[in-house]
Amino acid sequence: MKKFTTTLAAGLLGATFLTSAAFSATVQAGDTLAVDQTFTYRILDEFSSVDPQIVEDVDGADVVRDLFEGLMNQDADGNLIPGVATGFTTNDEKNVYIFTLRKDAKWSNGEPVTANDFVYAWRRLVDPATASPYSWFGELMSIEGAGPILAGEAAIDTLGLTAVDDYTLEVRLTASLPYFPLMTTHSSTFPAPQAVIEEFGDQWTKPENIVSNGAYVLTEHIPSERSVRERNPMYWNNDETIIEKVVTLVINDDNTALTRYLAGELDRTEIPSGQYPRLAEEYPEQALSFPKLCSYYYSFNLSENGPESFKDVRVRQALSYALDRSIITDKVLQGGQFQAYTFTPGATAGFEVPSVPYAEMTQEERDAAAVQLLNDAGYGADNPLSFNMLYNTSDGHKKIAIAMSQMWKQKLGVEIELANQEWKTFLETRGNQDFELARGAWCGDYNEASTFLDLLTSQSGYNDGKFANEEIDALMQEAKTLTDATANYTRVEEILAEEMPIIPIYHYTAVYMLNDKVKNWPIQNVEQNWYSRDLYIAE
């Protein structure tokens, strides 16, 4: 075995550095706790699942982070802190990681959480039989053997991880990956209870069956209506948790949700498009807007099922150029969002947004270029470009789609048919390439540029438009072995600006109404990985 050294991060995570304050809802000086410690918040759509290896949406991952705990967690600033693992070591090449698990971590049924629970979960993630929407994440993590397993060419027990003993997990990678520990905060890497899954099959996540290891347990779930999670007395740090109950309500209309928030029924909801300036003035202590590690974009269907018109790069460029993103951010949304000309947000750690040519043009110059490009591609008044535009049901998405279609109609004479679908139907339609132009949004799975740029490699499971570029594939593969991959990431963004497989629209801000009695919301964490166990409600 090669010599292993403890990284700086691991050193800070070592058991001798742990304090209870790092893992608890720290009450601010002068605050008195409210008697009722129930946190109630709204989501737009029913989440995809509470199964760690199946969940694929942000709202579902928020629930899963309460119900389950992975190797590592994040603090309020997005820094790594211990989870089930108290720390980790790595070798000089950073292609082998050894995690030491805490011995007081338990499942909600009282059974110990062991390294074998992670081995089972990670094998389950990449097992084709699981059909995990995030199966590709195992290969993205560069875990030895993940690729052949995903391709059906190897058994799942060849995956490069070993339970050395009950409290030691060894992970072997095919590449040097300094940011690998960051990836273990993602929900798809959380442990899974093998005996429970084998007993109940796909019914194991029902409240009456589920066994979890996080700070909360699922006690109620009425699909498309509400779910409830309550404190898990078996959680290793339950004594430091303050929030007793978390209630998630599915409210499909943004304005209805705001009305219910203002009536005191909710502690948090998203602010409807265009209403942040008014609400910030009326409720300065409750209306929030801050950078979030997410990108909003539209994908061209470049698969065999896609329209022939989109195979022409000039058409894709024309549609992107003709969009005045300032109208969407400043007139439609009005929540501090950032105009996007690259896929990766500027909020990404260690990433400097590169200058791409069309971002340096004035909007008038982009409009003129768009007209010329579309004419050169053979489209105009006598042969108008036409296509369908798909988004998931939401008043905000509808407003953006209407604004985009109007710009294209007025500037380019394009004929567009808008269509919306409910969330789960939309995911299936988009995933099956049964669309022409479809809304997309991506929030970083970890805070590093590759979490965005890997999405547009040919092997990515969420490359819904099926864009393929050999140079991008090579650049992203090489980036995994580089100490500084800035040049690779810059070149990938340049290629995306040239090839335009997606239309970047804006980079997110989190735009919330948050009850000012709810304390410790992690505003500084651009990933917005929040944990109810860190919150509390003041009087």
Image (cartoon, helix red, strand yellow):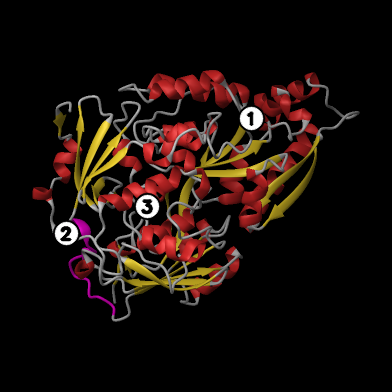
Precedes in sequence: disc 2 or disc 3: 2
- Region of the chain picked out in magenta, as a range: 20-34
Position of 91 relative to 168 (above/below) = above
Residue 143 is one of the magenta-drawn residues: no
Please state which amino acid type lies under the numbered disc 1: Gln
State the quadrant of the N terminus: top left
Please tell me whether the stretch drawn in magenta is mainly helix, strand or loop.
loop
Disc 2 from disc 3: Cα separation = 18 Å
Amino acid type of the residue that numbered disc 2 sits on in the rendered structure: Ala
The x and y percentages for residue 69 are 31, 56
Q: In the image as oriented, which residue stretches furthest toward the bottom?
A: 35
Q: Which residue is mark 2?
A: 21
In the rendered image, residue 149, in percent from the top left (x then y), is placed at 46, 36
Identify the residue under disc 3: 529
Q: Residue at x 28, y 29 (%)?
A: 95
Q: Position of residue 238 (x, y in %)?
A: 23, 68
Q: Is residue 491 left or right of residue 160?
A: right
Q: Quadrant of residue 451?
A: top left
Mark 1 closeness class: few <14, some 14–19, many ≥20 residues within 10 Å: some
- 219 w.r.t. 405: above or below: below
Left or right, residue 58 beside residue 437: left
Q: Secondary structure at mark 1?
A: helix
Q: Is residue 27 magenta?
A: yes
**314 versus 21 height, above or below:** above
Element at label 3: loop
Name the residue carrying label 1: 363
User: Of helix, strand and loop, which one carries label 2?
Assistant: helix
Q: How many marks?
A: 3
